[in-house]
Image (tube, grey):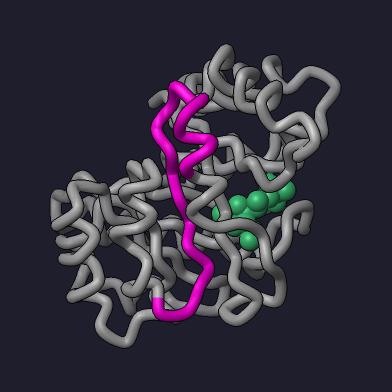
Amino acid sequence: MTPLIAPSLLAADFTKLHDEVDLINRSDADWLHLDVMDGRFVPNISFGMMLVKAVDGICTKPLDVHLMIVEPEKYIESFREAGADVITVHLEACPHLHRTLQQIHATGARAGVAINPHTPVQLLEDVLEDIDLVCMMSVNPGFGGQKFIYRTLEKTKQLRQMIIERNLPTQIEIDGGVGLQNAAAILSAGANVLVAGSSVFKADDPLQVITRLKQCGQETLLV
Ligand code: DX5
Ligand code: ZN
């Protein structure tokens, strides 16, 4: 199984944004992950739809937009217009999650649901059929460069089981603290999309790290 690799722009050098996006265009990455933070759902503020739109103008890969914001339903159409291909909302921020997923699908985007490290995967049971992607947070959202929470592997196995039992095509994305040191274990647990911020953009050779992350899946198959 070859995983999808989604480098997170949060760890990029914002003074050289065009170069950083060009690097992703030239790489083996599958998507570009964009972390939108509002200072309310998470204790940090990053960027909004204006930056997503600017990046969309220069990025050749699909944009995977992770909304760490309260009341995401107010902004879904705007992020879609800005160029989002996948729009992920947090379960913890959506009292009417099913309706919000319908709203995302109505724009033509793929719908993701992110869950925080403390949120059990069982809460997704009644909405799994309506989700294209589950983003499992393996750090507390809000900042790049944090340490991977290993309990996520157990949750990933449980979620993969739920998806197999229902015979669904749902993708499992792991976000936070992902790098070459834990990618194989994450993929063995059942994930198939890896978000990687610091491990890619802070590396001496980001292109090589992306290629090696993709190869981790093949190594997993051989084990
Ligand atoms: C955290 C974000 C992540 C973050 C990952 O709130 O959702 O996407 O950029 O960064 P690293 O890979 O550095 O943990
Ligand atoms: Zn993210």
Q: Most extreme residue toward the top, as rendered?
A: 26
Vertical side of 88 occupied by 204: above or below: above
Q: Residue at the location (20% across, 71% down)?
A: 127
Give the vertical position of 57 relative to 25 (above or below).
below
Residue in the picture at 44% in, 64% down: 114
Residue at far bottom of view: 95
| Front one among 146 and 54 | 54
The extreme right residue here reads 204
Residue 186, compared with residue 44, is above or below; it is above
Left or right, 131 with respect to 21, comes to: left
Give the x, y percent position of residue 171. Answer: 33, 46
Q: Magenta segment, which residues?
A: 53-71
Q: Position of residue 222 (x, y in %)?
A: 48, 20
Percent position (x, y) of residue 112?
A: 34, 57
**Residue 211 magenta:** no
Q: Tell me if residue 150 can be seen.
A: no
Does any portion of residue 65 appear in the rendered image?
Answer: yes
The answer to which of 223 and 152 lies nearer the viewer is: 152
Which of the 4 image quarters holds residue 23? top right
Quarter-wise, where is residue 104 in the image? bottom left
- Of 129 and 16, which appears nearest the observer? 16
Apparent side of residue 98 relative to residue 59 in the rendered image (left or right)? left
